[in-house]
């Protein structure tokens, strides 16, 4: 980025059941490219430059944080961006907040029926897209690939250098961010992931595969919790909404409705159940995602 990134803020969340909680405020590190989606993009953009590809092509659902981040990066860094969006019915409706913003950022939007969207990473389908758009650097849905890891590893190293903690905790969608953090920790401390989607046990193998691919190593200093999805991806239960409101009142920090809310809810619940050693420190990461509130009738408060 040409603008200097502000220093990472770490907020104290106090003691819960004998455990100290800290929150790394990565949602604040850049006003327009917040959180982990930018970290995952950073090294991919360098690779696109190296390959001489000025167009970024990617995929996402209608409220995707990743689509929003790619569109913003395109505007800020002067790249052409193309987004293939799940759901051809969206083409005939007014655009939602995420897609309105993405288009304002210059992203060309293409709407795909669900069947084509499901097959998007198949070579023939991808080739047809590229015929339509011209040469492009293709980023997968959610932004996770091998080059997504080093940007997240930088965050882990930055946190290790800044302060002491025992556990580093993050919300997981594809697991790319957790995988990157693991490579940055390089076996130090414990890491903990909370899956935002239901039935996410497959993520453990995905995360091992990602770290293996990136560093030739798998790690054992981590665990994934798959029972804090709160009903499923993008399901905001009344209980979770209430938690977000209470958290905001106590700490003055807004959590996002899909990821960090489930992370913090899960962390406090695990602390209450005695999961962490008394006297230990848990560093949770606020990975951003606040733009997704547009899909839930706006942010509370
Ligand atoms: C995408 C996202 C995640 C999950 O990241 P993965 O690398 O896909 O696991 C976590 N938090 C927020 C806010 C996100 O947008």
Image (spheres, rainbow, N blue to C red):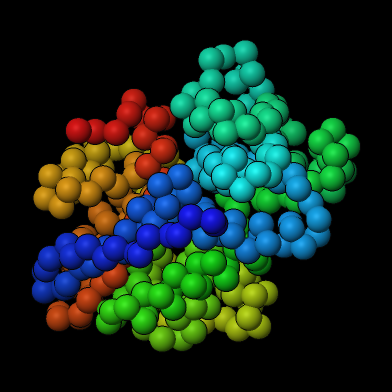
Query: Relative to 108, is 286 above or below?
Result: below
Q: Position of residue 193 (x, y in %)?
A: 40, 65
Q: Is residue 294 above or below residue 92?
A: below
The quadrant in which residue 108 appears is: top right
Total numbered circles: 0
Q: Which percent across, then down, holds residue 61? A: 57, 36
189 over 175 or under it: above or below? below
Residue toward you, 11 or 119? 11
| Residue at 52% in and 60% down | 39
- Kindly tell me whether residue 33 is visible in this rendering: yes
Which image quadrant: the C terminus?
top left
45 or 204: which is nearer to us?
45
Task: Give the residue drawn at x 23%, y 44%.
Answer: 244
Residue 257 drawn at (x, y percent): 34, 41
**Residue 201: horizontal and vertical position, in percent?**
50, 61
* Side of 100 where 244 appears, left or right: left
Q: Residue at x 59, y 75 (%)?
A: 211
Quarter of the picture containing the N terminus is bottom right
Say which quarter of the image contains residue 109: top right
- Residue 197 shows in the view: no
Left or right: where 191 falls relative to 70: left
Q: Nearer the viewer, residue 79 or 11?
A: 79
Picture residue at 42% right of the left edge, 52% below the top:
30
Where is 93 relative to 209, above or below? above
- Is residue 118 found left or right of 70 in the rendered image? right
């Amino acid at each position: 980025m040409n603008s200097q990134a502000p220093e990472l803020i770490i907020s104290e969340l106090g003691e819960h059941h004998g455990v100290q909680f800290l929150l790394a405020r990565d949602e604040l590190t850049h006003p327009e490219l917040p959180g982990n989606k930018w970290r995952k993009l950073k090294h991919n953009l360098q690779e696109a430059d190296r390959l001489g590809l000025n167009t970024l092509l990617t995929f996402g659902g209608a409220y995707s944080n990743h689509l929003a981040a790619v569109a913003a990066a395109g505007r800020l860094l002067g790249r052409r961006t193309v987004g293939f969006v799940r759901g051809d019915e969206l083409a005939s409706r007014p655009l939602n907040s995420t897609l309105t913003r993405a288009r304002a950022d210059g992203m060309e939007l293409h709407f795909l029926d669900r069947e084509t969207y499901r097959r998007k990473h198949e070579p023939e389908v991808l080739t047809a897209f590229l015929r339509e758009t011209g040469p492009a650097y293709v980023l997968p849905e959610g932004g996770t690939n091998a080059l997504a890891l080093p940007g997240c590893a930088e965050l882990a190293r930055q946190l290790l250098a800044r302060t002491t903690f025992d556990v580093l905790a993050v919300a997981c969608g594809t697991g790319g961010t957790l995988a990157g953090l693991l490579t940055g920790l390089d076996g130090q401390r414990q890491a903990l992931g909370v899956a935002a989607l239901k039935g996410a046990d497959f993520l453990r193998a995905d995360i091992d595969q990602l770290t293996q691919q990136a560093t030739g190593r798998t790690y054992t200093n981590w665990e994934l919790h798959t029972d804090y999805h709160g009903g499923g991806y993008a399901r905001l239960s009344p209980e979770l909404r209430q938690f977000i409101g209470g958290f905001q009142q106590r700490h003055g920090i807004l959590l996002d409705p899909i990821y960090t809310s489930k992370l913090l809810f899960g962390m406090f619940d695990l602390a209450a159940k005695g999961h962490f050693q008394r006297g230990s420190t848990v560093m949770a990461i606020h990975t951003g995602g606040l733009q997704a509130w547009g899909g839930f009738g706006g942010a509370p408060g």
